[in-house]
Amino acid sequence: MAYHTILGFQKEPFSTSPDPDFFYLTKEHEMALTSILIELRLRRGLTVIFGDVGTGKTTLSRKLVQELKKRGDMIFHMILNPSFSGERQFLTSLARNFNVDLSNFVDHEKLDIMDLRDAIEKFLIEKSVEEKRTVILIIDEAQKLDLTTLETLRLLLNFETNEFKLIQLVLLGQMELYSKVVHMANFLDRISFKYTLNPLDPQETKELIRFRLRQAGAPDGAQYFTDEAISEIYNFSRGYPRKITMVCHKTLKELVLQNKLIADRHLVRDVIEKEQQFTQSGFEKVALFKGTT
């Protein structure tokens, strides 16, 4: 039997999967999501969300997709791993995922870049202008984009009417993305909205934990974590949602193993110490392996 079932939950409260139903909207995340939706509705073109590893960018992107599904006038596609070997491969992927009509071209394998650009522009005009729909490309892990693909994205923003851009781009990436675009003046000045996600504060950490417990169907009155335990979790995680989720998950499993109902400061400390020992052991094994090659 799964540990969360033993503890009385209907679902696993601290899964690492980016489930939008378990996404706790802090003030920052809510501001980012609301601003993205406004930019998309106005069809301003380019939105960029920055954030360190574990600040909730991927889950924010899933929450965005959940919101877009509610709107019938939105056509969107999400790229999860934006690693492309050149402009042609990127444009081909874009055409395929948006079902761009390439029937006028006999041999798709011999399509050149200009053919692909023309076909995509025709598609965007048809959807955005004639059908009055919004075409959106969301790119997670955008720090992986190379300069060639970033330049291609900039060129796509040239497809526009007098009132709006024909394609809307939402990029979510780690801070190294900024170090790439900061030197691309023609790209940087096209960003309509940019925002940096920061870690949670102590109160938000507590609220996130309580929120996920409720979402998972925690029985009325069940706490599972004392306030002191949550303080330990915050001190270790420094407010990064991914680390918070990881420690809470391991702590709940430890509750089952120790046949306890609530985690106190000492239990959380034990879980964190085990995690740190495991991590250190992993580093030592990697160093040993490298030393033997």
Image (cartoon, rainbow, N blue to C red):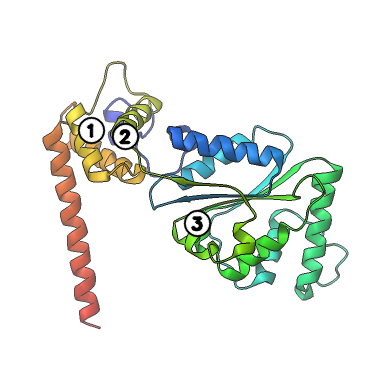
Mark 2 surroundings within 10 Å by alpha-carbon count, few (fewer than 14), some (14 through 19), many (20 or more): many
For marks 1 and 2 on the same chain, the one whose residue lies earlier in the sequence:
2
* Image position of 143 (left or right of 217): right
Q: Position of residue 288 (x, y in %)?
A: 19, 74
Mark number displayed over residue 141: 3
Q: Residue furthest left?
A: 266
Task: Name the residue that disc number 2 marks.
Answer: 205
Residue 209 seen by the camera:
yes
Q: Check disc 1 and report its element: helix, strand or loop.
A: helix
**Which three-letter amino acid code belongs to the residue tagged 3?**
Glu
Q: Position of residue 20 (x, y in %)?
A: 49, 37
Query: Depth check: 54 or 70 in front?
Result: 54
What is the C-alpha distance between the residues marked 3 and 2?
A: 24 Å
Q: Check disc 2 and report its element: helix, strand or loop.
A: helix
For marks 1 and 3 on the same chain, the one whose residue lies earlier in the sequence:
3
Task: Name the residue that disc number 1 marks.
Answer: 230
**Which three-letter amino acid code belongs to the residue tagged 1?**
Ile
For the residues bearing labels 1 and 2, Cβ distance under 8 angstroms: yes
**Which three-letter amino acid code belongs to the residue tagged 2?**
Thr
Mark number displayed over residue 262: none
Quadrant placement of the C terminus: bottom left
Quadrant placement of the N terminus: top left
Query: Depth check: 89 or 143 in front?
Result: 143
